[in-house]
Image (tube, rainbow, N blue to C red):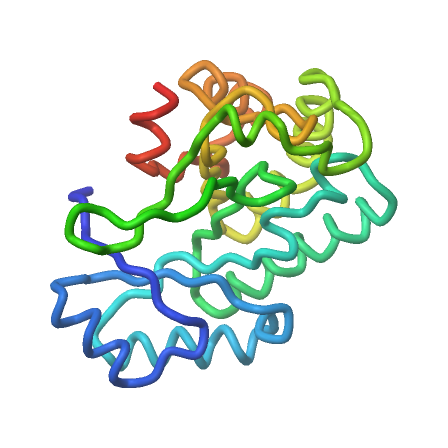
């Protein structure tokens, strides 16, 4: 399989946005859909619109379940959120979409303030001494083994449905790829982290989302 250029689009991309993706030279596009666009009809409509523009909608995620603290920290409603994830996989498959991204980032992507580059464009910055001073995101510090146990629980539940539906799970590394933020260990921050995740899953249904920036930083 040869590498192909992909760009992000909005979940309600119009013809101009899709034309721009084509003009950039992209062959594929991906997006994150809101909760009210997780149904089969909405996903199929989006995929068909992308198809008609001469592009491939290769990956669709949902932030509410793809970065879910209830799943990742074993909080109340964990099982309900996992069931919602399973149904999303079924809906993706029915709509002809076969990859979804998720990240083990219960508090999202962490950054310091954005700053202008030498040519004026804004760029993300990460100042670890500043991030390390921030309070716990969920009231206490979690151990790494707690988080791995929660990951294993999720894999036991979700892998059979991923295999059944033919929808692969693309695991994005933590951003930034450091060991702990806000009192919660960052699960996927290195090559060894991925190895452990793949061993737990024991299935090709789990794959890596190869974010070159995070990979370069984490190693």
Kindly identify the residue that appears in the image at 55 percent across and 80 percent down: 41
Quadrant (top left/top right/bottom left/bottom right) for the C terminus: top left
Image coords of residue 206 (percent x, y):
49, 36
Image coords of residue 93 (percent x, y):
51, 61
Quadrant (top left/top right/bottom left/bottom right) for the N terminus: top left
Kindly identify the residue that appears in the image at 69 percent across and 26 percent down: 183
Left or right: 130, with 55 as reference point:
right
Quarter assignment of residue 214: top left
Number of numbered discs visible in the structure rendering: 0
Kindly identify the residue that appears in the image at 38 percent across and 22 percent down: 218
Image coords of residue 49 (percent x, y):
35, 81
Residue at the extreme bottom of the image, as rendered: 15
Kindly identify the residue that appears in the image at 66 percent across and 31 percent down: 182
Q: Is residue 148 above or below residue 17?
A: above
Left or right: 155, with 52 as reference point:
right
Left or right: 172, with 214 as reference point:
right
Residue placed most toward the observer, 195 or 132: 132
Residue at the extreme right of the image, as rendered: 76
Left or right: 207, with 152 as reference point:
left
Q: Is residue 204 above or below residue 114?
A: above
Q: Is residue 28 above or below residue 37?
A: above
Image coords of residue 117 (percent x, y):
23, 47
């Amino acid at each position: 399989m040869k590498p192909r250029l992909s760009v992000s689009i909005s979940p309600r991309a119009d013809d101009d946005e899709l034309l721009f993706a084509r003009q950039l030279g992209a062959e594929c596009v991906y997006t994150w859909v809101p909760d009210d666009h997780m149904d089969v009809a909405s996903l199929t409509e989006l995929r068909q619109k992308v198809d008609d523009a001469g592009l491939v909608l290769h990956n669709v995620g949902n932030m509410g379940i793809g970065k879910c603290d209830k799943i990742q920290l074993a909080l109340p409603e964990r099982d309900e959120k996992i069931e919602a994830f399973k149904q999303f996989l079924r809906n993706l498959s029915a709509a002809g979409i076969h990859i979804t991204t998720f990240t083990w980032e219960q508090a999202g992507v962490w950054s310091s303030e954005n700053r202008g580059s030498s040519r004026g464009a804004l760029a993300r910055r990460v100042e670890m001494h500043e991030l390390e001073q921030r309070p716990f995101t969920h009231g206490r510090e979690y151990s790494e083994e707690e988080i791995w146990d929660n990951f294993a629980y999720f894999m036991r539940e979700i892998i059979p449905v991923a295999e059944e539906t033919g929808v692969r799970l693309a695991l994005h590394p933590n951003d930034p790829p450091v060991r702990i933020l806000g009192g919660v260990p960052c699960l996927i921050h290195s090559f060894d982290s991925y190895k452990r995740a793949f061993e737990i899953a024991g299935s090709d249904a789990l794959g890596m989302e190869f974010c070159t920036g995070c990979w370069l930083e984490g190693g």
